[in-house]
Image (cartoon, rainbow, N blue to C red):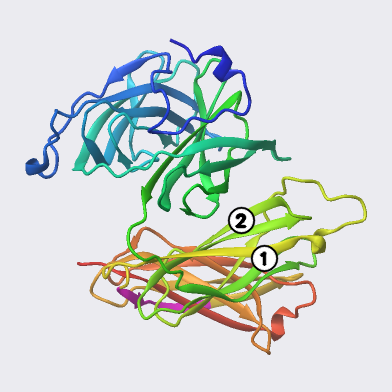
Amino acid sequence: MAFPARLVLALLLAVLAGCAPIDRSPSRTAVPGTPEPQNPAETPTPSLSLEIQSLVAVEAGKPGETAVLGLIVNRSGQAVDGLRLAVSLLDASGARVAESESVPALHHLDANDVSPFAASYNIVYEPGMRATARLTGYHAATPANQPLHSETVQVEELPDGSWMLLGRLTNPGTSAVKVHELAVLAVDAQGLPTGLLPWTAGTARIEPRGSLQFVATGRAGTSTAGHFIYARAEPITGEQRTEVRLAAGPELRQTSQGEWFITGEMENLSSRPVWGQAALRLDLEDQLAGMAQVHFPLPLVPGETRAFALRLPPLFVPLPDGQDLHDLQLRGDLESTPATAAEAALALLDLQVESYEFTGSRAFLRGRVTNPGSRSILTPSVFATVRSTEGKVLGAVWQVLAPDLPASAEQAFALSIDLPAQATPAMAEYDVRALGIEGDR
């Protein structure tokens, strides 16, 4: 059964997991090879029943790559999380050419919830390619999802052919909720998936009867006739405090090459490590013009102030004649989440900067990071901040080097840092450090 025409042909479509019809794909198959849950004492009752819908192979955003897209539906009467899928790519004859593990975009599914998923392969796409998927792991869970209303506000095709979607989520409930995951599935005129747009900007907390706007972006080259929004939100229990603040900025800056970027500093005010993030909003005469997101790969320790910088996002509205970007109003909405003890076990890594280079108002740093300890380091990351002689942030960047760095291993890095046009890179002060989360072995 194809998507209903009234749904597929409208550009501004929105369907939210958990509160939308799920029988809307041309084909449905039960997930084969369902494993036992990792904790047998939590075996769902009735037995687990998951279903794959709309499984298709498409050209990926990068040349020489193929992607598989699909939906997974929880048909059982029990909530599940920790879902993992093995997705096999088949050629036109049905022979398997590759297999990849995939995690659904929504990590927790209540009964009848739906989530999109994607898998990618470094294989050139060929017409006739197909795919199969099987479940390889899951946990039984307690129902926790809060249904939300969703709508697509605006969809823009950017100059490079990629897509930018502005959407809105509304909380109809009587308690505040936190959005944990959000993704947008693009479909063609036949209702088949063409791309999965990740959540790129927007706050996570929604007050009772409140709404939030968000941005999702997608790759170039997709044939898109509609979009479906999937989100997972949970009610917030207990007192929630914002334990981070903007110690400086956000501030708009411009390089000597005419590129715009945003700088600022986030400070952890609490006595515990926290994950801090900020949704940066650009307004023009009280109209939303653009959004960007600050999200650090590692938590902030108590009292830490960490600099950030990011490129100006694409704007939803054109600037009137005679106005420039300095007329935009810029503000940041901050949120924080306590880090677990394991996430807070940060360790410094040995770092050696091997070269500094300057081109225009851009600095390039290259070097190596070594793990001197006896344990593996998770999310090994390099942070670099450039300040004026007065201590003002001129630019910042961070880079996650690998998922983990084994004991005694080393990893090269190369950083490019935007600086304001009036800055003198050779006279600035550079703070470069490397750290990560200490593993248990």
| Residue 239 visible at all | yes
Most distant residue in the top direction? 1
Callout 1, which amino acid?
Ile
The amino acid marked with disc number 2 is: Ala
Which one is nearer the viewer's eye here, 49 or 391?
49
Instruction: Tell me which corner region of the image, top left, top right, bottom left or bottom right, holds residue 429.
Output: bottom right
Q: Residue at x 40, y 38 (%)?
A: 147
Residue on which disc 1 sits: 262
Residue at the spot x=56%, y=13% of the render? 5
Q: In the image, which residues are magenta?
A: 345-353
Q: CA distance from mark 1 to mark 2?
A: 9 Å
Given residues 102 and 143, the one toward you in this image is 143
State the predominant SS element of the stretch in magenta: strand
Within-10-Å neighbours for mark 1: few <14, some 14–19, many 20+: many
In the picture, measured across the screen, residue 281 lies left or right of residue 76, that is right
Location of residue 388 with respect to 222 vertically, above or below: below
- Residue 292: assigned label: 2
Whether the residues at callouts 1 and 2 have beta carbons within 8 Å, the answer is yes
Image height of 91 relative to 112, above or below: above
